[in-house]
Amino acid sequence: MRRRFSRNIGLIVLLVAIPPAVLGALSVGAAGIPLKQLLAQFVSGGGTVEHTILFRLRLPRSVLALAAGGALSLSGVLLQGLFRNPLVAPYTLGISGGAALGVALAIVTGLATALSLALPVAGFTGALLVVALIYGLNASRRIRDVQGMLLMGVMISFMASSLFMLVTALSRSEDLNGIIFWIMGSLDEPHLWLVYGLAVISVLGLGVSYLFVRELNAMALGEQDAHHLGVDVDRARTRLFLLASLLTGVTVSVTGVIGFVGLVVPHFIRMVFGGDHRYVLAASFMGGALFLLACDVIARLIIAPLELPIGVITGLVGGALFVTALVQKRRGI
Amino acid sequence: MKHINRWMIIACCGFCVGVAGLAAQQTPPQRIISLAPSLTESLANLGVAARIVGVTSFCSRPASVKQIEKVASAVDVNVEKALMLKPDLIVTTKLTDIKDVRKLQSLGLRVEIFEQPRNFDQLCAQFRRLGALTGQSTQADSLIGSARAAVAALSPVADSEARPKALIQIGADPLFVATQESLMNDMLKRAGGQNIAETWGNGLASRERVLALNPDAVFIVTMGVAGKQEQAVWESYPSFKAAQKKAVHVVDAYLFCSPTPAGFARATAILAEKLKPLR
């Protein structure tokens, strides 16, 4: 009872932390708009540079950080639950490799210059092809268990990465730059509808994931036990895989590859909230959103007025926090 | 009569607005952001350094631009900073992240993108375009004329057999060399050399291939200590002609990688001087 209460409090804390975190992120940047003026910009009309900075740059960026962080973390927690493997991350199954390959091909063939939406479309197509391949093999029963599915995903990931390297090795220097920029990940998305679209999809994904709470909790005991508890394991596995993959594919196609969020945040959340997916799903979503938002603020501040690629910060901060938490856990602190 | 007066006033106002609009359009940009070192140096050459309000952290020539506000690194443009500087022109190359370019354009900023020049003529054409954009066409033409004269004075070698075989190394690990897609290929040719890597695709190369073709000279365009290390590597091969002829040179990477027409002429003169004893 007490544990349930503390977990509810934990969820409320995460939820309540989002508005001030967003306000903090909105007030940080090269323009140095003070908080008071920031609030005034919400009320006053447009036309000023500050208004443009706030509504066209900082707000979409913060929304994208929340949406991408939430989606990646949720995807990570779903896949870790599905595979009962804490090392599985959204990119383990080759979804990012497929997306990267799609983007590299779009850049090399000149599509990225000709069409403004070529990069997200190519990224999503690449991710979708990988998902379809793994799903097809799973549906045709060539893969009979989750470990086989995981192994197949890892192999496809390696193949996609190798093909990606082949394309980059044969590309021109200007194209190579574009590919590297995409790989580093970025929250500066010029198409606002993609930003807000991802926000809607990630929240919908959270909603849909709650349809599988019972299955996830049962599968945590093992597939056999889940089956005995009345769970249609095959169906749940397929649907969870598709949900996590689509969340990852959509996110990667908009932001590029942002690592560590889907691996580190679910771990932290499990340390605090335990293994009950009723809490873990929402907490991971909010935790991932807050984590990526914080990382973006650090990326913007650390060498201001220049910015660091977001992936650098998620890797460094996420890795350091994770190691610290593990060491403290072992010491029993 | 009353109607005629009214129409006359409207026509005059319209004319004045039109003229004012045209004048505003023709006023050269006064607040320029440059997102490439070569463009920053070109702007300075054109005499508009005072109008530059933002540069990248890699723009260091001429020395005066080091004081200008930094708005971009090699990998990222701070769009917010750029917007805050209220530029009326942003010049950049295709090496800038396309997402950043589109973001700047979506904010209504004027972004002019310059292709990577593949030869001296393209470089001059781009310099002329930059001159036209900044209202410095006369200055641009004059500088191009001087650079062309300097390059033409480098006594071209007509006989291809007399041209020493050379290689321009851009990267060390993996080995990356200048091919026909690179401006340095044209520098080498105009300096009287022949590029052994002219047709080597995107420039990714192997040492084995270089050793097999055994060039008379190697020019290393790598910044920092890597250049010296690479020089030592090439010189360690006893059968390597360039090492035997003491023709493995480390050259100024900034000059070769971020050229202006005048810079091209200087770089070509350096190559020509090093190649002369090998003919």
Image: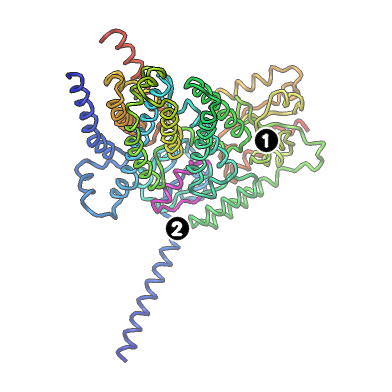
Residues beneath discs 1 and 2 located on the same chain: yes
The amino acid on which the numbered mark 2 sits, given as a three-letter code, is: Pro
x%, y% of residue A275?
A: 31, 20
Along the polypeptide, which appears first: circle 1 or circle 2? Answer: 2
Residue A201 placement: quadrant: top left
Q: Relative to B175, is A219 on the left or the right?
A: left
Mark identifier at residue B271: 1
The amino acid on which the numbered mark 1 sits, given as a three-letter code, is: Leu
* Residue found 20% across the figure and 26% down from its top: A8
- Which span is picked out in magenta? B95-112
- Helix, strand or loop at disc 1? helix
In the image, A189 versus A312, the foreground residue is A189
Residue B202 placement: quadrant: top right
Chain containing the residue with disc 1: B
Distance between mark 1 and mark 2 Cα atoms: 37 Å
Mark identifier at residue B28: 2
Chain containing the residue with disc 2: B
* Residue found 22% across the figure and 23% down from its top: A7
